[in-house]
């Protein structure tokens, strides 16, 4: 889960990392009030979960409260990098001597935390190239003072890196990035921005933190995605016309790829794998609730999940919902004989022997003009 | 790890509903399960398998080569430490949603004592005709047949589809290694490739990868450096090539961040290393016929 900037910064302050003074405003009047209270030059920053915010026009500066009001008014309600801006963060502008980059993330290659550091801050990590220091850490020993000193070059920065590492571990972060980290003319380091992503799997031991973020951001995702989450299903709404229902993350991704490969566009990602494989009924309701769906592709491959149980669920849902769009099935693996029989006899639909043939048929059906079908 | 029929297996968390269901299936595959463990359930038995309170207690009575962990995600770290303390050197960790920091900790601990760990978030490993450990249908003859194709998969469902196609095309598997869908794994694609490279029964390798991370690129690097595809042909399929960036496609590890982890970068790296990369899994049979003839 992505942590909004102002909450991430408060979590940094809890560990003694300096951030600019600031406050969140939901309207231009409040923005002016905050600017007046802070005094001097302020930054006005759109609170959106996207990188390259500066480049997309999501950050403005103001010398006076009046200017802050005008610039906040121009940002709030606008779309920046595809996200609607509901809140802006008003912060004192720092007295910057130079900008640096520090990040810690979970690294699959070294199978431990990876510290990234660059003396060139303010730009995206992909643009860093050769200047970046990458140091793989052992999660059992962490980041000791000597290592931090060696990477940072000075004590104040080394101490900040250690504090960041402490936060990274304590909060179960996937990513903790301070970019830019500013060195002020006084020699003090100050975190001008903070990107923090929490590990969703750590939710059971970070309950309060997750609740705090969810209260602040409101429910994430589209209405259908929220409904799916309430039913403990993982659903992503996409912009195509072929509704997809498959089991397991890998097979579902592959089904979406196959729709693309044959020239169609999927309407959703939805997997009913693991313990969710008995939830075919509620899953199918979700797929059909999307008004863009013109055909439905069901792709099951049973390993530990049984295709007959999934097919029974789909058959029940089909009989209850009586969908007006055509269905196309590909069923393989554990329980396939029984599953194919259920689909054939109860729904009167003949499953395809090859996945790609089912995909092509579903795409063709989605392309037919409305009203042509009986 | 490629398990053999004579190797002894412990089932951690054996008294749970899923674990006892799969214990029966694993036994049917020929797996030599000698003991189970569940905290507070010592003294019971499941299908005649004696249950102990811990892996350490089980290891005091039995010689154990491998353990499979049917543990809830938050209890997995302690169970891995229990197994390592018991001296068990092959671990298959099935749980999904284990906090990544826990995974990094126990993967480092396993490595520290020289243990092989597969997972987490894996469906398990199968050696057709010998044994199966985990929740893959090693007993299904249309999916698993003894043979010469090594299969490496991040996904259970897609791995099954690929294995079906391999068997349908008249081939069999030397082993199926489900490595798991998490961002940090005990056995990576490159590790598994190295295992199959050294396995005399394996004549070709199928990599079932997906977007996210850089495991497939690292495997391609190994293949390129050792010129593996000239010894054993490599066929790969990468799932999620059409996925929108920044969205997690079901598996915790399946996410493209910036340009990192995109399907295209994996396809390019594997092709450069001499692998045949499929656009659809349905092509697996014909491609295997070409490379193995």
Image (spheres, rainbow, N blue to C red):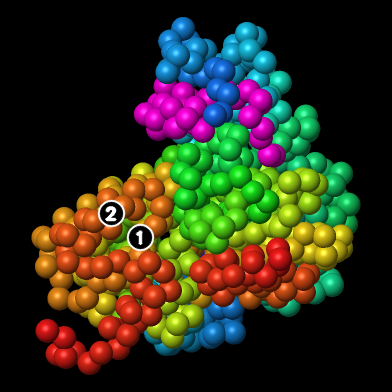
* Image height of A100 relative to A10, above or below: below
Q: Are marks 1 and 2 on the same chain?
A: yes
Residue A76, horizontal then vertical, whole percent: 39, 80
Image point (22%, 92%), residue name: A369
* Image height of A59 relative to B238, above or below: below
Image point (54%, 55%), residue name: B167
Secondary structure under badge 2?
helix
**Label 1–label 2 contact, CB within 8 A:** yes
Viewed as shown, does residue A204 lie left or right of A226?
A: right
- Per the image, is A322 magenta? no
Between residues A60 and A356, which one lies in front from this camera angle? A356
Image point (32%, 78%), residue name: A362
Between residues B199 and B211, which one lies in front from this camera angle? B199
* Image height of A155 relative to A44, above or below: above
- Circle on res. A331: 1
Q: CA gap, disc 1 to disc 2? A: 7 Å
- Circle on res. A339: 2
Residue A374, horizontal then vertical, whole percent: 12, 84
Residue A372, horizontal then vertical, whole percent: 16, 91
Q: Can residue B98 be seen here?
A: no
- Per the image, is B12 magenta? yes
Between residues A256 and A71, which one lies in front from this camera angle? A256
Q: Which residues lie in the magenta part?
A: B1-29
Between residues B261 and B31, which one lies in front from this camera angle? B31
Q: Please identify the quadrant where the C terminus of chain B is shown.
A: bottom right
- Circle on res. B249: none
């Amino acid at each position: 889960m992505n942590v909004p900037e102002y909450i991430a910064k408060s979590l940094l302050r809890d560990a003694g990392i300096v951030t600019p003074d600031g406050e969140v405003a939901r309207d231009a009047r409040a923005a002016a009030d905050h600017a007046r209270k802070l005094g001097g030059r302020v930054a006005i920053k759109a609170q959106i979960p996207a990188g390259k915010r500066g480049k997309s026009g999501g950050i403005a500066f103001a010398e006076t409260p009046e200017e802050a009001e005008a610039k906040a008014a121009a940002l709030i309600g606008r779309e920046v990098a595809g996200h609607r801006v509901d809140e802006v963060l008003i912060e004192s502008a720092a007295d910057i001597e130079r900008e640096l980059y520090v990040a810690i993330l979970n690294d699959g290659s070294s199978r431990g935390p990876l510290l990234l550091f660059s003396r060139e801050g303010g730009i995206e990590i992909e643009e860093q190239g050769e200047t970046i220091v990458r140091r793989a850490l052992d999660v059992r020993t962490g980041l000791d003072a000597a290592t931090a000193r060696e990477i940072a070059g000075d004590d104040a920065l080394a101490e900040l890196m250690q504090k960041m590492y402490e936060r990274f571990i304590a909060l179960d972060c996937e990513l903790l990035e301070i970019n830019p980290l500013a060195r002020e003319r006084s020699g003090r380091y100050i975190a001008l921005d903070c990107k923090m992503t929490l590990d969703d799997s750590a939710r059971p031991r970070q309950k309060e933190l997750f609740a705090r973020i969810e209260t602040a951001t409101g429910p994430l995702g589209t209405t259908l995605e929220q409904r799916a989450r309430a039913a403990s299903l993982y659903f992503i709404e996409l912009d195509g016309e072929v509704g997809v229902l498959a089991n397991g993350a890998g097979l579902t991704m592959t089904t979406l790829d196959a729709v693309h490969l044959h020239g169609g566009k999927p309407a959703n990602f939805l997997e009913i794998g693991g313990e969710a494989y008995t939830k075919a009924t509620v899953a199918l309701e979700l797929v059909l609730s999307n008004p863009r769906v013109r055909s439905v592709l069901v792709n099951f491959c049973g390993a530990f999940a049984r295709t007959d149980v999934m097919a029974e669920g789909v058959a029940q849902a089909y009989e209850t919902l009586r969908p007006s769009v055509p269905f196309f099935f590909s069923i393989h693996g554990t329980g396939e004989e029984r599953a194919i029989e259920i689909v054939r006899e109860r729904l009167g639909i003949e499953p395809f022997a090859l996945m790609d043939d089912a995909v092509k048929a579903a795409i063709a059906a989605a392309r037919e003009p409305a009203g042509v079908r009986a | 790890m490629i398990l053999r029929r004579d190797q002894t297996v412990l089932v951690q968390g054996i008294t749970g509903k899923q674990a006892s269901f799969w214990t029966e299936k694993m036994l049917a595959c020929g797996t030599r399960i000698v003991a189970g463990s569940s905290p507070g359930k010592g003294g019971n038995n499941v299908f005649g398998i004696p249950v102990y309170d811990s892996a350490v207690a089980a290891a005091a009575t039995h010689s154990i080569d491998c353990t499979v962990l049917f543990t809830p995600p938050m209890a997995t770290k302690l169970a891995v430490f229990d197994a390592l303390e018991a001296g068990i050197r092959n671990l298959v960790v099935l749980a999904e949603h284990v906090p990544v920091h826990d995974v990094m900790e126990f993967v480092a601990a396993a490595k520290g004592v020289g243990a092989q760990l597969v997972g987490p978030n894996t469906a398990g490993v199968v050696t057709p005709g010998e044994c199966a450990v985990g929740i893959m249908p090693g007993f299904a003859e249309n999916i698993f047949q003894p043979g010469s194709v090594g299969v490496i998969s991040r996904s259970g469902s897609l791995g099954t589809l690929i294995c079906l196609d391999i068997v349908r095309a008249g081939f069999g598997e030397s082993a199926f290694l489900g490595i798991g869908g998490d961002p940090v794994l005990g056995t990576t694609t490159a590790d598994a490739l190295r295992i199959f490279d050294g396995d005399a029964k394996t004549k070709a390798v199928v990599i079932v990868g997906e977007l996210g991370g850089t495991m497939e690129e690292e495997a391609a690097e190994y293949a390129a450096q050792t010129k593996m595809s000239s010894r054993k042909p490599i066929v790969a399929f990468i799932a999620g090539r059409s996925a929108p960036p920044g969205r997690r496609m079901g598996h915790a590890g399946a996410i493209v961040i910036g340009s990192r982890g995109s399907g295209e970068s994996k396809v390019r790296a594997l092709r450069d290393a001499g692998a045949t990369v499929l656009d659809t899994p349905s092509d697996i049979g014909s491609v295997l016929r070409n490379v193995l003839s």
